[in-house]
Amino acid sequence: MEITNIKKAVLFWGILSEEAVIYLKEKFHRGFVLVNPELRPYLLGLGWNRDALSAAGLEFLYCTDNMLGHLFYQQKIKELLILYQKKMDDGYLCLSSSLYVYELAKYHNVDVKFAAGTELDLDKFSDSDASTLAGRPMYAESLLGEVEKPRLDLIKEEGDG
Amino acid sequence: MFNSPLSFPVRMQGKKILVLDETLLPWEEKYLEVLNLEDALFCLREMKTRAFGQVLLYFYTCQLLEEEYQDKSTLADLVAKKFKATRPTFDFFSLSSLLKKSLREDKPLSEIIATFLDGFDKARRRRCAALAEVLPQQSSILTICNINGELIYLAEALRNLGKEYRFYVSETRPYLQGARLTTWELQRAGVNTILICDNQVAKVMAEKKVNAVVCGADRANLQGDIINKVGTYALSCLAGIYNIPVYAFVQYPYDFSIEKVGIEERPPQEVFMFLENIPDKENIEAIYPSFDIVPQELISGWVGLEELRLNDKRKWK
């Protein structure tokens, strides 16, 4: 699919749950393209989330995380669904990368909704940071330096979604 | 300080061009031989080189074909046309214009190009020195993709000023130029470097771990809009939100409407580079815009080859 052919899309971010898939199914049948991002370092877009969408018979559009800014700029994304790990008193505990899409959505006046995702042990993924991709080291071992490891983070939601 | 092979990833050796195959880095440092125009176009098409490498490849391809063309202006335009058809986002005609302005009947192309590139490299070092002047005493710089050795020039300039520095590098999916090239060249040079996933940039900004963003630009217009590796737009938006300045290295800006430039969409299967083990990926529908647009209002300063121009109209101060 060429980007110009995307009329309206919903972006989701986090670990899909059955409830979230049902929500996305409704969006899909209303003509939304489901944007399934790669979600580094865990590659959820090619693993867990891909499997969840395929099991529900839902087609999706895959892209890497850094391409999402371009989709926001082109006004293709009409809604962001963030899948949290835990609801807290003052916000949502999410994958720490959620801030990336949350801020971009707010900047582009895109509607943000929160829903419960599936709780998974992040340590079970072969990639825990940017130093590997699908288990493969991404730079020469002799030059292995510092790598920032992502975990969970609190997003304080402004207004309820 | 260590000089990165990426500072000059393409070079001339006798009657052939040697192109550093950037797709193999950091695991293997291998040079491809280019003997004709088709070889050069192959290197472009297959992303064996990019950024400054494609500039070098353009000039050296003209040099390689010099004997076959009586009229050097025709040659410069022909190579630009072929290159542009292969990589539409980059404006190779600005290079042919530059070359045509420098043509002299009594001088071979090799001499003209060598003089030009020497001047270009000196200008790159000068602009890094100029940028170093405006960066903080303790600089923590976030960058994306790869700027062909210029961050090493920048680190050197910061050190000469007695400033401290470290670099956060966004991995830059799907080709991973940040992880494979920038992290590689900076760490080889002994520069403190921290690698992050592309989606971690907001997090490090929110935690005040970075105080400047420095990026390259494949194209820039006179108004200050740029086109750069996909991800630069998101980085620039987020930097604005967190009140962090964004400096873009630009070369030869000219008058064009940014919105009229077609953003190159690469074959979707290329997003799976380095993901050979993902099952049934041929059936995944994907997109791959390889660049994005950053409007002028998101940029704090343009680091040109002749001057550093600060933006007094940035959306955020």
Image (cartoon, grey):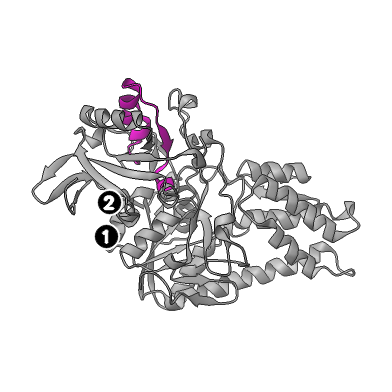
Q: Residue furthest left?
A: A89
User: Does the magenta segment cover residue B48?
Assistant: no
The relative height of residue B274 versus residue B76 in the rendered view (above or below) is above
Label 1 CA crowd tier, 10 Å (few <14, some 14–19, many 20+): some
Mark 1 belongs to chain? B
User: Quarter of the image holding residue B243?
Assistant: bottom left
Helix, strand, or loop for circle 2? helix
Q: Foreground residue, A2 or B116?
A: A2
Q: Foreground residue, B130 or B6?
A: B130
User: Quarter of the image holding residue B67?
Assistant: bottom right
In the displayed structure image, the side of residue A115 where residue B121 appears, left or right: right
User: Does the magenta segment cover residue A45?
Assistant: yes
Disc 2: which residue: A99
Residue that appears at 44% across and 27% down: B277
The relative height of residue A159 versus residue B216 in the rendered view (above or below) is above
Which amino acid lies under the numbered mark 1 shown in the image of this protein?
A: Ala
Asked if one can make out residue A7 in the rendered structure from this viewpoint, the answer is yes
Do marks 2 and 1 share a subunit? Answer: no
Magenta residues, start to end: A39-68
Q: Foreground residue, B95 or B145?
A: B95
Give residue B206's mark: 1
Mark 2 belongs to chain? A
Give residue B232's mark: none
In the displayed structure image, the side of residue B16 where residue B177 appears, left or right: left
**In whole angstroms, how far apart are the C-alphas of marks 2 and 1?**
9 Å
Which amino acid lies under the numbered mark 2 shown in the image of this protein?
A: Leu
In the displayed structure image, the side of residue B74 where residue A10 appears, left or right: left
Percent position of residue B58, x then y:
71, 55
